[in-house]
């Protein structure tokens, strides 16, 4: 399966997190909010080209800054 | 022996509502993460003893990753674990994510009671939870509750004593998520159902096209409704009271009074064409109450009604997502929308809530932008009162100038300030529809706060102005500032008084411009300058508290510089 960053996935795609390449602090924050390696999530939308990405993890909806989304590497299910 | 009870939980699970229920202390609660920026304390009677209850800021785990989380965790460690009880509040509609903190609390040996809040909402969303099974698996008391209605709160207090430490081995978050997955499988059943209208609207509000359309409609609608309600209160309630009842009463009482005396000057002010004019007389009993109750209060009521509604429904975080792009250019991120919107009500809570932003740099940018470019309701009400009769063009012009200033300032600060602005990472809450009683309570709480804060200052302010005017003490000040005010801004030198009073309260200051017979250009410049120059004294105090003295000086110098440049530009270039 091809790996891409979350920023480059199409809206409404279901993807699995492969890696979080943003330093341990970001990784930790995402981990405590329920986004971690192996987790399934749905990308809901992307506001503008450099804008935030909205995802759904379990029953939680999260908005991630563009920079954060670029650091989450995912693969399509 | 329990000495303190802590309320802990993820952001936006309703900790503050539970807190209000337990202690009777009213605190502001809203449907967005980070409402609680100041730690609230209250008391609960437990076994005939008064026990302190502390409402901690929301945290996702016990290893803090932000300032607010750090505060929560450090407070938790104040007392030995056998002298406290921890109420872990959980959003029942989102059990899985909430359990991470629960497992960590239990592991580390805190005496925990789990309060499953928002139980009423689970049914609508097709979530079924087996509470007994959850209690068995966690090994701590689990109580289902709905803090909005008060259900389960009594049981919660009864079972606090059952909280006993049961420390377990420390594991990693990854292992915890695995364990949580297993718990969820056993206790939660999700009903498959079609998307409800609410869910479709939740979704549409964070998609680019539909989201921006909705945002436009909501902001436009909110603005219209605030004006409609505010004007309605003025024409149907406050104006009749002031003009048909209060004015004849005052005139009758002062019929035989010597007009030239000090007391007459202080209490009633100047008569305009032999009559009291609430807008121009400038007395403690005439203009002061009219400004506060007749011009400002109606808009305070309508603004907070609409703001509270949007807060409780949960719309504001969605607006934050849509505006993230724009705010990024100003060195902020989307969430700065919350402090800015609160700042439109009053700059003080706006600046206080910049604490939801993480870095010092962001807080400085946000606080400076709020105190320069975000006019509070009292100020806006007065600008409408002052310029409204000349048409919407001028009122809109003031807003346009402020908006451009915010943009320019933000771009400049983003370019030159050192430090960093972290990325946006925010949970978007579901829409919720709180009972009207909650909304009224919040509105009442905010209006009471406004009156308690504003009224004494307004009365004292007008008193002080009159004393200074009567003894002609302003003359020195006026003479000193006249070159700037007259030469650069094209205002009459009496306007100095208004600008100085602006430091006390903005609404009174705009009121001071009313008797000066200014041209519309002068009014426009005066009102704009009052909006951007010095913040009022209350804002000044919180700015000092939040930014430190150095930050305050920096921010103030910026304000003075910007005021002089803007005033001069408006006078000589734009409004020629």
Image (spheres, grey):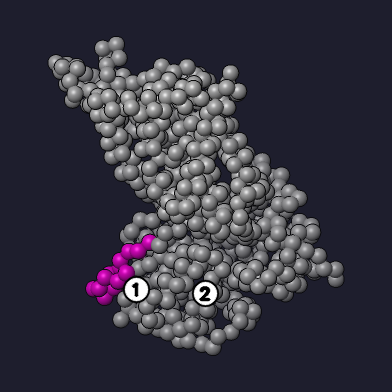
Percent from the top left, x then y, of residue B338?
A: 53, 50
Q: Specify which label sits upstream in the sequence, 2 or 1.
A: 1
Picture residue at 30% right of the left edge, 21% below the top? B281
The tag on residue A55 is none
Protein chain holding label 2: B
Picture residue at 45% right of the left edge, 59% below the top? B36
Mark 2: few/some/many CA within 10 Å (<14, 14-19, 20+) = some
Residue in the foreground of this view, choosing between B217 and B324: B324
Q: For residue B172, what is the image quadrant?
A: bottom right
Q: Is residue B301 visible?
A: no
Q: Is residue B88 magenta?
A: no
Q: Among all residues in the image, which is located at the extreme bottom?
A: B169
Percent from the top left, x then y, of residue B311?
A: 50, 49
Q: How many marks?
A: 2
Residue in the foreground of this view, choosing between A22 and B385: A22
Check disc 2 and report its element: helix, strand or loop: loop
Q: For residue A41, what is the image quadrant?
A: bottom right
Picture residue at 38% right of the left edge, 61% below the top? B40
**Helix, strand or loop: magenta stretch:** strand
Residue in the foreground of this view, choosing between B572 and B275: B572
Q: Among all residues in the image, which is located at the extreme right?
A: A1
Segment tinted magenta in the rendering: B40-52
Percent from the top left, x then y, of residue A2?
A: 85, 68
Q: Is residue B421 visible?
A: yes
Circle 1 sits on which residue?
B4
Q: Among all residues in the image, which is located at the extreme left?
A: B256
Percent from the top left, x then y, of residue B39?
A: 40, 62
Examine the rendered structure and indicate whether residue B492 appears above or below residue B98: above
What whole-number distance in Å separates the C-alpha atoms at marks 2 and 1?
A: 19 Å
Rendered-image quadrant of the C terminus of chain B? top right
Circle 2 sits on which residue?
B62
Q: Among all residues in the image, which is located at the extreme top?
A: B273
């Amino acid at each position: 399966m091809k790996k891409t960053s979350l920023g480059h996935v199409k809206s409404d795609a279901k993807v699995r997190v492969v890696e979080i390449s943003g330093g341990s602090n970001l990784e930790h924050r995402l981990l405590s909010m329920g986004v971690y390696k192996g987790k399934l999530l749905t990308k809901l939308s992307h506001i503008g080209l450099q804008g935030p990405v909205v995802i759904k993890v379990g029953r939680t909806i999260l908005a991630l800054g563009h920079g954060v989304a670029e650091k989450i590497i995912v693969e399509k299910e | 022996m329990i000495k303190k009870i802590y309320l802990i939980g993820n952001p936006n699970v309703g900790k503050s509502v539970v807190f209000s229920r337990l202690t009777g202390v009213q605190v502001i609660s809203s449907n967005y993460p980070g409402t609680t920026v100041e730690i609230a304390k209250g008391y609960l009677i437990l076994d005939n003893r008064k026990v302190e209850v502390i409402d901690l800021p929301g945290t996702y785990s016990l290893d803090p990753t932000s300032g607010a989380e750090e505060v929560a965790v450090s407070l938790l460690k104040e007392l030995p674990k056998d002298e406290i009880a921890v109420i872990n509040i959980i959003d029942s509609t989102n059990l899985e994510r909430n359990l991470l903190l629960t497992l960590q609390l239990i592991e580390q040996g805190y005496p925990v009671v789990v309060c499953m809040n928002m139980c009423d909402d689970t049914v609508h969303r097709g979530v079924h939870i087996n509470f007994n099974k959850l209690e068995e698996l966690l090994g701590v008391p689990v109580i289902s509750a709905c803090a909005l209605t008060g259900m389960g709160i009594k049981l919660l207090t009864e079972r606090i004593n059952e909280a006993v430490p049961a420390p377990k081995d420390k594991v990693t978050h990854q292992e915890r998520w695995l364990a949580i997955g297993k718990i969820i499988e056993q206790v939660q059943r999700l009903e498959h159902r079609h998307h409800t209208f609410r869910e479709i609207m939740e979704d549409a509000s964070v998609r680019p096209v539909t989201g921006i359309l909705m945002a436009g409609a909501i902001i436009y609608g909110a603005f219209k409704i605030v004006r409609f309600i505010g004007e309605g209160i003025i024409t149907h309630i406050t104006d009749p009271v002031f003009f048909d009842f209060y004015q004849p009463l005052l005139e009758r009482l002062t019929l035989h009074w010597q007009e030239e005396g000090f007391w007459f000057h202080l209490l009633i002010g100047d008569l305009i064409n032999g009559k009291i004019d609430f807008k121009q007389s400038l007395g403690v009993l005439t203009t002061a109450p009219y400004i506060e109750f007749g011009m400002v209060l109606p808009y305070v009521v309508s603004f907070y009604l609409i703001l509270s509604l949007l807060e409780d429904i949960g719309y504001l975080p969605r607006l934050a997502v849509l505006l993230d792009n724009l705010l990024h250019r100003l060195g902020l991120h989307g969430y700065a929308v919350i402090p800015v919107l609160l700042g439109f009500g009053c700059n003080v809570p706006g600046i206080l809530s910049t604490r939801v932003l993480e870095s010092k740099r962001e807080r400085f940018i946000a606080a400076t932008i709020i105190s320069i470019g975000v006019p509070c309701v009292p100020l806006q009400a007065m600008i409408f009162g002052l310029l409204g009769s000349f048409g919407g063009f001028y009122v809109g012009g003031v807003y346009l100038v402020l908006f451009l200033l915010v943009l320019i300032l933000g771009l400049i600060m983003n370019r030159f300030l050192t430090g960093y602005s972290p990325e946006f990472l925010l949970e978007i809450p579901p829409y919720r529809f709180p009972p009207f009683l909650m909304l009224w309570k919040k509105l009442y709480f905010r209006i009471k706060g406004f009156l308690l804060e504003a009224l004494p200052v307004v009365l004292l302010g007008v008193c002080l102005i009159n004393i200074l005017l009567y003894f002609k003490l302003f003359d020195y000040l006026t003479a000193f500032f006249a070159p700037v005010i007259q030469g650069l801004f094209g205002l009459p030198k009496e306007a100095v008084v208004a600008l100085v009073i602006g430091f006390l309260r903005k609404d009174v200051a705009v009121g001071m411009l009313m008797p000066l017979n200014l041209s519309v250009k002068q009014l426009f410049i005066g009102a704009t300058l009052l909006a951007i120059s010095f913040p009022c004294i209350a804002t000044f105090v919180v700015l000092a508290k939040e930014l430190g003295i150095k930050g305050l000086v920096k921010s103030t110098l910026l304000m003075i510089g910007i005021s002089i440049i803007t005033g001069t530009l408006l006078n000589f270039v734009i409004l020629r």
